[in-house]
Image (cartoon, grey):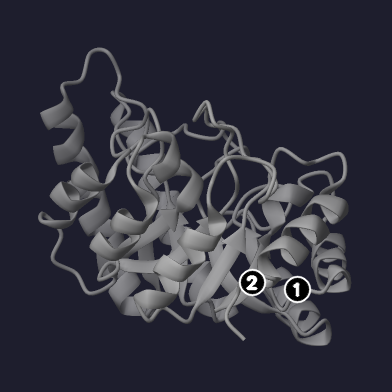
Amino acid sequence: MKLAYSSNAYMRFSVEEAIARIARIGFTGMELMADVPHAFPEDVTTKQIDLIRSLLRRHGLELSNVNAFMMNAVGDFWHPSWIEPDQAHRRRRIDHTVAALRMAGKLGAKCITTEPGGPIPEEVSREEAMNQFVSGLNEALAVAQEVGVSLLVEPEPGLLVENADQFLALADRIHSPMFGLNFDVGHFYCVGDSLPETIARLAHLTRHYHLEDIAKTRIHKHLIPGRGAIAFEEVIEAIRATGYDGWLTIELYPYLDDPDRAGSEAMHFLRELLPA
């Protein structure tokens, strides 16, 4: 298993500076934020893609994932979502995901992550929201197949798909080899799913992991690993037992004031737990 750091901790820096800083800390992998100010897919040019590729090579970094969850360029963390009442807003999310898939393919990334539907609007039933989500995902998954990049859904507290049961119900409706799970350890902890059991239960669908700590209250606020209540020794052992040997991306977007220090602390804490 390999550690990466998400560039969404560097929203106050350019993508060039984020790449340099993540490498300087000592990471060998980076998750690229598909949003401003780093690489909003709808606006990114061929020249910018070439620059990102060149900088990654120069600094010895691989892409662990392209994070297409947030859309601050046109909305916020969750909006536009896959289940907006307004069809044009839903279309914006689908188009953004398709653009992110195509950008990821050009960058050589193996996967992108997206939100799990979004917050359920009051005027939309859960069944209708799920139908809209599945329809949009299937459209994007056709492009994922074309470009050879997996599309991973990331369950999150308070959104359409927030726990293991709901994710498995969604997976039963998707029939694409490019579909998978971004297993965010903190998110599953927040909703009360047992982490070792859920890691094993969802291993056949997991393609990438996000790591962050969460307080004992289970309130959804990302903390540096080691500062909260998650038993990371058990988490790492459970992941190892599944045979997973890919990227574990540390996601610490609340630490915008000092992302270098946060990333360094997280990296050193987790490296002590990884198998030799």
Relative horizontal placement of residue 167, taking residue 52 as reference (left or right): left
What residue is rendered at 22% in x and 74% in y? Answer: 177
Q: Above or below — where is 235 with respect to 111?
A: above
What residue is rendered at 59% in x and 63% in y? Answer: 249
Q: Given the image, on which type of amino acid does mark 2 rest? A: Leu
Q: Above or below — where is 35 with respect to 66?
A: above
Q: In which quarter of the image is residue 124?
A: top left
Q: Which of 29 and 189 is in front in this view?
A: 189
Local SS, label 2? strand
Residue 189 picture location, percent across and down: 43, 41
Residue 152 picture location, percent across and down: 37, 60
Which residue is label 1 attached to?
A: 27
Local SS, label 1? loop
> Mark 1, residues whose alpha carbon is within 10 Å: few (<14), some, or many (≥20)?
many
Which residue is label 2 attached to?
A: 3
Of the numbered discs 2 and 1, the one sitting upstream in the chain is 2
Q: In which quarter of the image is residue 106?
A: bottom right
Please identify the residue farthest to the top as the structure is shown. Answer: 122
Q: Above or below — where is 219 with respect to 189?
A: above
Q: Which of 248 and 77 is in front in this view?
A: 248
Q: In which quarter of the image is residue 93?
A: top left
Q: Nearer the viewer, residue 155 or 230?
A: 230
> Mark 2, residues whose alpha carbon is within 10 Å: few (<14), some, or many (≥20)?
many
Q: Which of 237 and 246 is in front in this view?
A: 237
Q: Tell me the quarter of the image containing the N terminus.
A: bottom right
